[in-house]
Amino acid sequence: MKYIEEFQNPDLAKRLLDEIHATVTRPWALMEVCGGQTHSIIRHGIDQLLPEQIELIHGPGCPVCVTPLEMIDKALEIASRPGVLFCSFGDMLRVPGSGRDLFQVRAAGGDVRVVYSPLDALKLARQNPDRQVVFFGIGFETTAPPNAMAVHQAARLGVPNFSMLVSHVRVPPAIEAIMCSPDCRVDAFLAAGHVCSVMGTGEYPELAERFRVPIVVTGFEPLDILEGVRRSVRQLEAGRHTVENAYPRAVRPEGNPAARAMLADVFEVTDRAWRGIGTIPGSGWRLSERYRAFDAEHRFSVEDVTTLEPAACRAGEVLQGLLKPHECEAFGTVCTPRTPLGATMVSSEGACAAYYLYRRLGGTPVPAAGKEANPVG
């Protein structure tokens, strides 16, 4: 198959579903790691087509959602300062901090701009040498390479007024943390294909063996996800636990060597806090000592920001697969895309946003259909 439409073919989907139905004999819980997979599952109703013994649970795979509140508050603090031009992808502007968001900072006079690439922020720094230009660098292994490239370019070109607020996270340590949780009920993982397109599959065999859990690298179209489920169920029913690549059109075992080399040059592994989950050892990146001069946290001295997480928000349980979005008391009532308590409701990859957007409401009273049809803006 060569075209996207072919990966949404209903006849092929039915064949995969028939095989899954014929294979499963007992309950299994499968966790998809990526928020893009979550949206595809909910949008196409894949979870409702699977045998009732198979439950898909949603993991911490949304980069905006797992960015810790402390880092959001640091972004708000930096963006509020005179002379700062703060750049971010659009999703981050509506993510609530302890008391406000970046839209409110902009409304109050802060120069907050949406960019489509970290190199756009670097370009702004070169065009505005009298301003401090800061880029909010968040995300998983997928967005880290271009962000690393921007810092590398800033150093090579000698752009002293450019810096980056870094909040990058890594998937394998998160899988380990989930499996070590006493509340864990994951039987298999659908690993994020785009992460593996960068990092390869080399980090997963040890996890699959140690936790005796199948890990199937999976894409994002309906047939990709059904194939990931089919392979996971086949392993579980056979008592196997290996790594399989069900996304070979994008993922090679070695990943992208050039991107990995850039990551190794600019970043170093560090402990990192995940919003709603806590600190996971070795789960993040920060700028290496060679590039520390471009670290916005140090440049603006925002290490001691105090945070206040809303008590009603249960996004942390959603991100760990312990709670479905519509099972939260605040879902669709006090927490909506226009009044989000947490990032899972406002991010374009958030699980709560997917449930709200595709009206997967679970009987929870919400505004009439048609209002706030798009959770992001």
Image: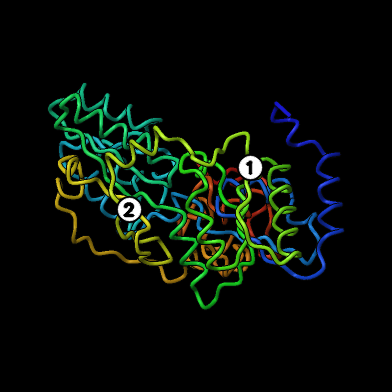
Provide the secondary structure element on which disc 1 rests: loop
Q: Position of residue 141 (x, y in %)?
A: 43, 44
Q: Nearer the viewer, residue 61 or 374?
A: 61
Q: Nearer the viewer, residue 372 or 128?
A: 128
Do residues under tags 1 and 2 come within 8 Å of each other at their CB atoms?
no
State the residue lying farthest toward the top. 127
Q: Amino acid at mark 1?
A: Phe
Visible in this render: residue 356?
no
Provide the secondary structure element on which disc 2 rests: helix
Which corner quadrant holds the N terminus?
top right
The quadrant in which residue 235 appears is: bottom right
Give the number of marks: 2
Q: Is residue 201 above or below residue 252?
A: below
Q: Residue at x 38, y 57 (%)?
A: 283
Q: Position of residue 278 (x, y in %)?
A: 38, 67
State the residue lying farthest toward the bottom. 182
Q: Position of residue 118 (x, y in %)?
A: 34, 32
Q: Residue at x 15, y 36 (%)?
A: 83
The quadrant in which residue 277 appears is: bottom left
Location of mark 1 (residue)? 220
Relative to 323, is 255 on the left or the right?
Answer: left
Foreground mark, 1 or 2? Answer: 1
Q: Amino acid at mark 2?
A: Ile
Q: Is residue 127 above or below residue 283?
A: above
| Lower position in the chain sequence, tag 1 or tag 2 | 2
Q: Residue at x 63, y 50 (%)?
A: 244
Marks 1 and 2, how far apart at CA: 28 Å
Q: Position of residue 191 (x, y in %)?
A: 57, 51
Question: Which mark is on residue 72?
Answer: 2
The quadrant in which residue 123 appears is: top left
